[in-house]
Amino acid sequence: MIEDLYKKRRQIRSAWDQKRIPSKELIEGLLKKTLEFAPSKQNLFPFKVHVIEPDNTKDLHNIAGICALHKTGSVNNWEKNLNNKSNNTDYTKAPWVLIFELRLCEPNSFVTNHSKIHNDWTRFNQIMPSRYRKNTNMKLASTEIGMYIELLTGLCLEKDLAISYIMSFPNWSLSKEGEYMKDGNKTGYTWDKLPYITEAPVMVVQIGYKAPIKDPLATKIKFGHSYEENKPDFKTVINFHPKRTD
Amino acid sequence: MIEDIYKKRKHILSFDETIIPDKNLINSLLKKTWELTPSKNQFMSYTAHVVGPEHKSYKKSIYDICTMNESSANNNKIIDKPRLNENLMCLLTAPYVLIFTNRYEDTPNKEQSYLISRGVYYEAADKDNFERNMNINLLEVGMFSKILTGLCLENNLDITYTKCFSTNYKNWEKTMPFIKTSPLLIMSIGKGKKAKNPKTYKGEVTDLRPDFERIVEWI
């Protein structure tokens, strides 16, 4: 069942249905359900999700610019030679966009009690204003965001929703003083276009229904194709370690 | 329903050492996960090292590294008399322990090679800087582990995630020479014997997750 479900997922680039828009109730229900059973160390969830609604066209446009690598507003500029518009419909726009960013956590009762009992408030990076932006917490947040997104993906696929992931956007790194150093991209867009993004963005996710058309920008995984994008072999990624004889 | 499967997950403190899932089953679940997990530019620039039932000494080393890390995270203040750390017994008792580490891609696929030849830069394929790719790898390892979790639960296997360890591979390679890059996540697989209960204080659950509204903001 898990296998059949996740097998359905495709990265949608230019085939988002512009007529059939998932309702807010549906998206909210899926996000809530995901939060119910997503795991998090100490249950602190060191990240936040900004959900850009379909009618917020200004921010959706800005996000497209932020995630674009080309001045045309394209991620890869492949569509310059492709007719991805028909009947004046632009299929590149996903109706729902989620931005995951880092978050300074508030301590839950366990963390508060643990810190009081041991008279040590430095134990949990997730709640420390001086440490939550640093690498250790960023690494934890990245893993937990990956887990959250994969659960959300399963729930979306169950509802026949398509979900795509974007990680091509300007990064924020940390100065020695603990301030963010913010990159821009070729288009001149930065995350400052969205004033509610105040912490390092980690991932952008798009959700919607797939239009009943062939995605002209779909990833090509056909072996031998000149644009073949196959994965590394199983044995390259998974290493069993048999009993040593030495 | 996928919800019903994932709801079954419990954080396992110790596994039943008398029940050893077949290696072929674990291998097939890993293969399926490898097929299903997405990766940016298809790099999958991480490795899952599978430490099987025969490797008691490796598991003891993993346990020691995690115990040492927990005690240093607590500034060595919470030192009781020597005892086994209940939170980390999963590492000693699980038949299978997976250690995910960063991986340098020395043989990019055709598309990656073509783009590299056109001047595109990939950290994952840069021998000197591939570890900088860590946050992407961590995110993707999170995705991989979650799909593997679903497949395990479907097969009545339990799992535990461990994130309390030194990420400096030099602390690992002394006893586990196959660890040559930074560890990212540990995942234990087997048949659960004892699961963690919610933490309580004076009868009240204390480690509740934050409210939905704190995590999700509508724009």
Image (cartoon, rainbow, N blue to C red):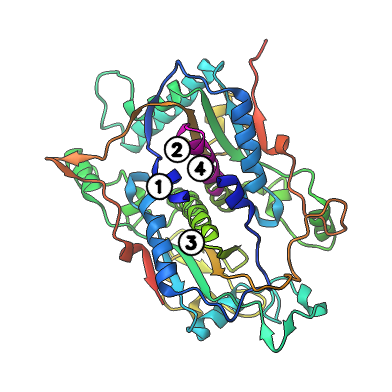
Q: Quadrant of residue B78?
A: top left
Badge nearest the viewer, 4 or 3: 4
Q: Which residues are magenta?
A: B143-165
Can you identify the residue that label 2 sits on?
A: B161
- Give residue A106's position: percent from left, percent from top: 28, 57
Distance Cα–Cα, label 1 vs label 3: 30 Å
Q: Amino acid at mark 2?
A: Tyr
Badge nearest the viewer, 2 or 4: 4
Q: Are marks 4 and 3 in contact (CB under 8 Å)?
A: no
At 57% from the left and 39% from the top, the residue drawn is B182
Does the stretch in magenta take in B152?
A: yes
Q: Earlier in the sequence, mark 2 or mark 4?
A: 4
Q: Nearer the viewer, residue A19 or B149?
A: A19
Q: Are marks 2 and 1 in contact (CB under 8 Å)?
A: yes
Q: In screen coordinates, is A41 left or right of A146? A: left
Q: Amino acid at mark 4?
A: Gly
Q: Chain of mark 4?
A: B
Can you identify the residue that label 1 sits on?
A: A39
Mark 3 crowd level (few <14, some 14–19, many ≥20, 10 Å Cα): few
**Camera sees residue B119:** yes
Distance Cα–Cα, label 3 vs label 2: 31 Å
- Give residue A43's position: percent from left, percent from top: 33, 48
Badge nearest the viewer, 1 or 3: 1
Secondary element at image label 4? helix
Does the stretch in magenta take in A206?
A: no
Examine the rendered structure and indicate whether residue B167 appears above or below residue A199.
above
Can you identify the residue that label 4 sits on?
A: B150
Examine the rendered structure and indicate whether residue A86 appears above or below residue A231.
below
Distance Cα–Cα, label 2 vs label 1: 9 Å
- Give residue B155's position: percent from left, percent from top: 51, 34
Can you identify the residue that label 3 sits on?
A: A175
